[in-house]
Amino acid sequence: MAVALCCLVSSSTLAQTAPSSSQEQQPSQQQQTTAPGATTPAQQQATPTPDAPTVTPTPMQQTIAQQAQQAQQVGPVTSQAPFHIELPHSRNPFAPYMPSTVPPTNLTNSPRLQSLERDGKLYVSLRDAIALAIENNLDIAYFRYNLPIAQADLLRTKAGGFANGVNTSIAQGTQGGFSSSGVGSGGGGGSTGATAAGAQGLVTSTLGNGAPISSFDPQLAVQALVDHTTLVQVNKSQTGVPILKQNTIEVASSYSQAFSLGTNFTITDFGERQTTNSIFNILSPQLTTNFNLTINQPLLQGFGLATNQRFMHIAKQNLQLTDLGFRAQVIATITQVENIYWDLVSAYQDAQIKERSLAYANETLSDDQKQLQLQNVPAMQVMKDEAAVATAEGDLTVAKATLRLNELLIKNALTKTIEDPALADMPVIPLDLIGSPDPKAGEPIDQLIIEAEKNRPDVAEDQIAMQIAQNNLKTIKNELLPRLSLYGQYIGVGIGGLMNPACASQIIDCSTTLPSDFAGAFQDTFNYSSPEYQVGFSLVVTLRNRVAKADQFRAVLDYRQKELSYEQQKKQILLDVRNAQYSLQQAQARVNAAQKARDLAQKTFDISKQEQNLGAMSAYDTLTSEQALAVAQSALVVAQTAFEKAKAYIDQATGFTLDRTDVSIDDAKSGVVTHMQP
């Protein structure tokens, strides 16, 4: 019995110590499964960040560090088809006369979005948000079509057509993320180059005015007819018959083309076969051919490559403007996504602060209710606790609603569609609570201005706009000149046919040496048997010339306005950079002040808690200190959010956004991120 009793005691002891031993083995196993270089949840909890107050989580509640560690195990991102649209080209001779098609828009979210989903939640870092925006944001997707539009416009001008222009204004269909301090024109939204690619509104621009340009595409025209005519004659003296009957078959063709010097030529060829019952016609059928070559060369108005290729030059510069405008669009969208992300971080942290504040208020209420039953505290104390709980519940409700709104805004910015109810209701967990240091924060203002003038796309847009305006002043002068053209013409005629049988019975001589078929008649057209040469000039002078004079004068006025806009843009760059630097300095000062206030509130709360344990302070006083701590923590979160936005603002103002976020413009054009480092 003693042995059995000893065995029973030892087995029960082992049963009680087994769970503790298994718990001791869990950290070692977790360390083995942790990726190299990553911190464990225990290590992340041991070093609290300024925006994560030191509150012990419940066993069922994961910390931000634990959620971030789970989200780091991102699965492989499957590939997707890049955006690529080529101009239609084919060797099929009928292809130019058939409509071209463009692939339908892809409204499927990129596979990267699914790779970030874990347990019904979307874990997103700032770099993930930027990558998703490049692949899915509809503002960038909309502007992406401007690139082939500009290429199509260039193709049109190569044929002599005028440039339709491309709208290079920044699209801002994405909601949220706009800075309250005012975002500068680093995205190119306020530059004169943004409207240089095409006139908008009811006002007609003088851009591209000048002499008319003929089509550089050859034009071929063919006309054929079959005609039967019956005509009653007044007498038979002219035709020899009372009723004249004629059958005519006629074919006419022409070929014309113009060239960049203003030279244009036209070739016409005419063939006719005519039969008649007139007895006086020697030939029936009579065959007639006619060849006409006319070359025309303007000497004043309409002469020169600059005049006839002006739209082509504008379209080529519009291609550069479109590339710069796309760069500005990407910068503006990335800056907006950064602001939306930091708004989400602020709402996420504020909701957690409100949850902890409510939990502490409920804990205080529970303790005071127990003390009330023991008659250690007055009933008024419990009523104050209940009021504090009600206030905390209201604050948490507002914080959760704000968080849901910011989750919806960032999902709208990072997706092509959110029609899936699961995606629409999916919580978004931000992984980066504090941004990386900005190297531009410590640079002197003069260096920042120089970098802004070098990197900002709107500066290059304004420079190209000035070049277009200068070229326009040169080409529009050609319209003032009279129209003087020198032309030359060669005409050849050939006639043939068979002898009319009705004519042979007449007294007149019906014999002829003309060829009897079309081949012989067509040969006579070019053997100089019946040639005609003509050389001349054409001069047209518009008296008073008020339309052309007004256009040229207005073009000079427009150029002066662009000069002022260009200088204004230089001043705007200086203001943007200085404003961004001031905003960054102010935001840094607010963060420092908020951190000191939060630290002071934390010390006050700790002292109040200790005095409460010693009985020198009531639980309600400690609750008041905790509420003040929550307010200080929320103020710190707001200050940090403003600081992160200020860093995004100064990057946009200096044109440094793409470099700091490691975004490739080629990835943005294709819609597939491949160059961004993890």
Image: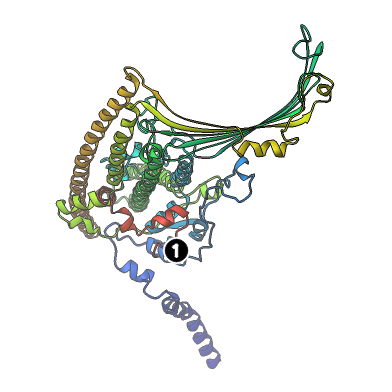
Q: Nearer the viewer, residue 492 or 465?
A: 492
Give the residue at x 31% y 53%: 657
Give the residue at x 38% y 64%: 65
Q: Is residue 353 visible?
A: yes
Q: Residue furthest top?
A: 234
Task: Point out the image quarter for the C terminus.
Answer: bottom left
| Left or right: 559 as drawn, with respect to 392 | left
Under mark 1, the amino acid is Ala
Image position, residue 229 (x, y; %)? 77, 18
| Left or right: 275 as drawn, with respect to 114 | right
Q: Is residue 398 visible?
A: no
**Dot 1, how many residues are within 10 Å of its Cα: few (below 14), some (14-19), or many (20+)?**
many
Question: In the image, is residue 147 above or below residue 240?
Answer: below
Total marks placed: 1
Q: Residue under circle 1?
A: 71
Q: Nearer the viewer, residue 268 or 74?
A: 268
Task: Point out the image quarter for the N terminus.
Answer: bottom right
Image position, residue 607 (x, y; %)? 20, 58
Q: Residue furthest bottom?
A: 3
Colour scheme of the picture: rainbow
Q: Nearer the viewer, residue 600 or 516?
A: 516
